Amino acid sequence: MTSTSSEKVFSKYQIFIIVILSFIHFTVILDFMVIAPLGAMLLEIMDLSPAQFGWVVSAYAFSAGISGLLAAGFADRYDRKKFLLFFYSGFILGTFLCGVATNFVFLLIARIVTGIFGGVIASIAMAIVTDIFPLQMRGRVMGFIQMSFAVSQVAGIPFGIYLANAYGWHAPFFFIVALCLVAGATIVRWMEPIDAHLRIQNEHNAFNHLKNTIRQRQYQKAFVTTAMLSIGGFLLMPFSSAFSVNNLGISQHDLPLVFMFTGLSVIIVLPAVGRINDIIGAMKTFTAGTLLAAVMILIYTNLSVTPFWTVVLVNVILFAGIMSRMIPAMATMTAVPELADRGAFMSINSSLQQIAGGIASVFAGFVVVQTVEGPLQNYDLLGYYCVVLMMICIFLMRNVQKIVEEKHKAKQTETPIH
């Protein structure tokens, strides 16, 4: 870290932007993640099969990935405040529809609507950060915004499950809608228009730019790696709560505590992994994290009825491994694109993450089988598939790392590669 970044001080308005974007990111992540912990309830109340629940989870990911890709070419053609409000309003509508859903088809459509609008919000937030904050500040800004993931684990998801246990599975979605309405009103009232980019628009075709970005071979290697990382990382998630309740013997009321303690560990692990990444390098950190996560996945997916604190400990170590993979992987990906292609590359990369996650969820739904007695079968198979994909990703990440190293060597940059 340079001294320049530490000397930069946020203005009051910049602090407001950080807070509101972090809060928006929190609501979107919470909506995306809360569906999995509700899995045990939905499988029983709506009489869903594991395959149907897999489609419910993946519907958001597929629609978010497709809409994010289609909207990328138009993101620079509107005032970002209005663009954000449009998609956030659609996201609120989709979340409300989830709360009033009464059957599988209704819920599936509601998740599609939510994904169509929610999938674009993260990329709009990234553009706002780029517009408002100088380069020397963006690392800290993104760190604050990304912490909303951990907050959703610590507070949002446990509270959402508490609401579901107390008032029914619909309640978490109404809770998210209420939070979103507050955030939306705050944006309308206090966020200033963000339209400076409209005065310097060039005339190149947005679709051609996306097409040319996709065609670059070096970028394709990065895209394949991102897709494989996302598939492997998402395989276990859709049925994690159902596995905890039906196979590990964790009660529905204790489930929020598992997420809370896991989230607390993420808050501690995130800065530690970042520091380790800077000391030993991205590839070593990624490999070590992969090996740790693989071992813990094999242990976790083969557990039967297990004491509560053992489940918590296994989850904490597992997430430490996962974070040790994702942080160096994403840091390396940001160094792949040229400046002129950065927006398109990031949009495509984000969409691929969503779509790959959807594919993983559908696949998991076909593999997992719920017995008449309740426990899930074949969850251990998902663990084996996940470990194989993780091992493949080590070799894929090495190729991406070579691309980054060759690019920086050719340019004789003085910026260290992490």
Image (cartoon, rainbow, N blue to C red):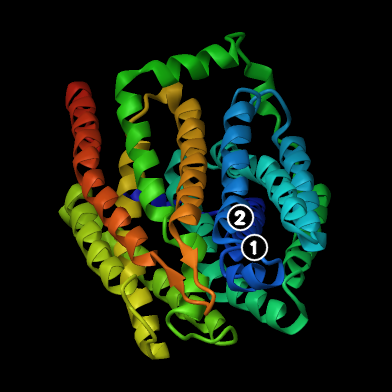
- Horizontally, residue 209 falls left or right of residue 191, namely left
Q: Amino acid at mark 1?
A: Leu
- Please name the residue shown 82% across and 61% down the image: 100
Percent position (x, y) of residue 174? 79, 66
Q: Nearer the viewer, residue 166 or 284?
A: 166
Task: Look at the numbered disc 2 and give the secondary structure of its residue.
Answer: helix
- Please name the residue shown 63% across and 17% down the image: 200
Residue 293, visible in the rendered structure: yes
Percent position (x, y) of residue 50? 55, 60
- Please name the residue shown 58% across and 41% down the image: 62
Residue carrying label 1? 48
Residue 187, visible in the rendered structure: no
Q: Nearer the viewer, residue 180 or 377?
A: 377
Q: Nearer the viewer, residue 57 or 279?
A: 57
Q: Amino acid at mark 2?
A: Gln
Q: Is residue 49 above or below residue 192?
A: below
Residue carrying label 2? 52
- Horizontally, residue 154 falls left or right of residue 318, namely right
Task: Give the Cα separation between the discs numbered 1 and 2.
Answer: 6 Å
